[in-house]
Image (cartoon, rainbow, N blue to C red):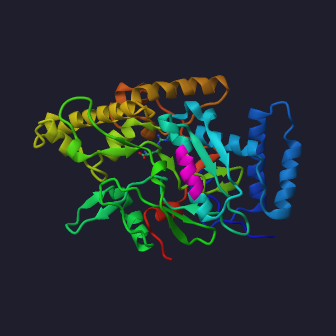
């Protein structure tokens, strides 16, 4: 009996990283998924023959292969099951690129760049996932170490401050250790992709600039931000979460939707441990930053978020605002209920980081049960995204 590769550990079911999934567990998870797939997609077809075939394949090979239709539905349902995501109304529109035949780092880097171009779509962002080779009993699949396909470098300066995104300090250091020459030295230098084949050795791949659509951030009115030269990338493409379908782990499966403005304006550019821009925006607005009760942070937040929405709109790049997206989420709950499904959600992640109670998603509670298929965080992947590597 071949040994099993590590499953995705912290998803529903809570496996530990080193745990090898037993044939029986795999067969049970497979049967659950095949049953769900048939119920939702092939309601007039008996799932039993497919389940029997999968069991045989598992007994013979230690794993099984999803059909492209199963993979597609699995990836969509994993989105539907993402309790932290407010944007799930469109889960059925996720386009799935089936690239399971690719397991080498070069091909993955090349296809990741193509993914970004297709997802960017000239500004009309398309929800997209590219699925690369899964783990097999004989060999782990490839891994993308970057947290997202597009991340900005964070450089430690001699004075001890950080140039760029402090979140990516570790990954930046690792890239430099692996031989990256560094970017031009702006606060928004795009990091190279760091990808490992099944052998686990990370290698660097520069993203072609034409794959990285970005938006310059400028306010619609009032004092300009020209000297700050703010920008953000158009496509949030999560690259290090593991897609878990019916017991099979697709650890290299980058996926994206479109941004909600607050992710950029109220978190990435505003958090004290990220770009920490509120003091500088407040200064431009002439606010008294010595007095908390002037609400300078709050006023700066609103202006920065107006600037993000205005800039994406002006550039013709899809971006959601938190009021619209909140209403859509409630529509999603209604629509799912009409299909006999209860939406699960994590309140702390669903409620937007500004004006929470001014949106309807605030005024209710949610069942936070986790279902599969799912996109799960792998602790090893998080360590890699922090640049931790004992190689
Ligand atoms: N919050 C993350 C970021 O700011 C992206 C997470 C996914 N967001 C999305 N809209 N699909 O980069």
Is residue 284 found left or right of 353 in the rendered image?
A: left
Q: Is residue 16 visible?
A: no
Residue 258 at x, y percent in the picture: 48, 38
Residue 262 at x, y percent in the picture: 37, 37
Is residue 282 found left or right of 355 in the rendered image?
A: left
Which of the two residues, 254 or 31, is positioned nearer the viewer here? 254
Q: Which residues are magenta?
A: 110-117
Which of the two residues, 276 or 369, is positioned nearer the viewer here? 276
Most frequent secondary structure within the magenta stretch: helix
User: Which residue is rendered at x = 68% and y = 62% of the image?
Assistant: 135
User: Which residue is rendered at x = 70% and y = 40% of the image?
Assistant: 73
User: Which residue is rendered at x = 86% and y = 34% of the image?
Assistant: 45
Q: 228 above or below 62?
A: above
Q: 329 above or below 107?
A: above
Q: Is residue 328 visible?
A: yes
Which of the two residues, 231 or 24, is positioned nearer the viewer here? 231
Q: 306 above or below 283?
A: above
Q: Is residue 114 magenta?
A: yes
Residue 30 at x, y percent in the picture: 76, 50
Q: 297 above or below 193?
A: above
Total numbered labels: 0
User: Which residue is rendered at x = 58% and y = 57% of the image?
Assistant: 110
Is residue 159 found left or right of 376 in the rendered image?
A: left
């Amino acid at each position: 009996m071949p040994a099993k590769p590590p499953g995705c550990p912290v998803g529903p079911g809570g496996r530990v990283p080193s745990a090898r999934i037993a044939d029986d567990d795999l067969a049970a998870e497979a049967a659950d998924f095949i049953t769900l797939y048939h119920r939702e997609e092939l309601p007039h077809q008996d799932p039993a023959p497919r389940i029997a075939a999968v069991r045989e394949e598992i007994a013979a090979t230690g794993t099984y292969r999803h059909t492209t239709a199963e993979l597609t539905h699995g990836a969509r349902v994993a989105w539907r099951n993402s309790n932290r995501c407010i944007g799930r109304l469109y889960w059925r529109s996720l386009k799935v690129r089936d690239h399971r035949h690719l397991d080498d780092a070069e091909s993955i880097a090349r296809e990741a760049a193509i993914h970004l171009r297709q997802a960017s779509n000239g500004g009309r962002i398309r929800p997209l996932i590219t699925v690369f080779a899964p783990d097999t009993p004989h060999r782990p699949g490839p891994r993308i170490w970057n947290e997202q396909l597009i991340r900005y470098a964070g450089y430690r300066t001699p004075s001890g401050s950080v140039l760029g995104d402090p979140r990516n300090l570790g990954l930046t250091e690792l890239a430099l250790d692996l031989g990256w020459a560094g970017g031009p030295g702006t606060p928004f230098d795009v990091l190279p992709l760091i990808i490992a084949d099944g052998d686990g050795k990370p290698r660097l791949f520069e993203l072609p600039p034409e794959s990285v659509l970005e938006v310059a951030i400028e306010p619609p009115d009032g004092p300009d931000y020209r000297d700050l030269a703010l920008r953000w990338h158009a496509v949030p493409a999560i690259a290090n979460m593991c897609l878990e379908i019916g017991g099979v782990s697709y650890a290299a499966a980058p996926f994206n939707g479109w941004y909600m403005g607050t992710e950029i304006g109220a978190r990435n550019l505003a958090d004290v441990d990220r770009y920490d821009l509120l003091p500088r925006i407040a200064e431009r607005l002439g606010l008294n930053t010595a007095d908390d009760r002037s609400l300078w942070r709050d006023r700066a937040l609103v202006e920065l978020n107006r600037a993000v929405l205005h800039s994406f709109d002006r550039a013709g790049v899809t971006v959601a605002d938190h009021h619209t997206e909140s209403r859509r989420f409630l529509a999603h709950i209604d629509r799912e209920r009409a299909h006999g499904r209860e939406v699960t959600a994590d309140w702390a992640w669903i409620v937007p980081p500004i004006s929470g109670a001014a949106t309807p998603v605030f005024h209710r509670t949610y069942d936070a049960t986790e279902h599969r298929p799912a996109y799960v965080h792998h602790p090893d992947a998080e360590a890699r995204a922090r640049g931790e590597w004992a190689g």
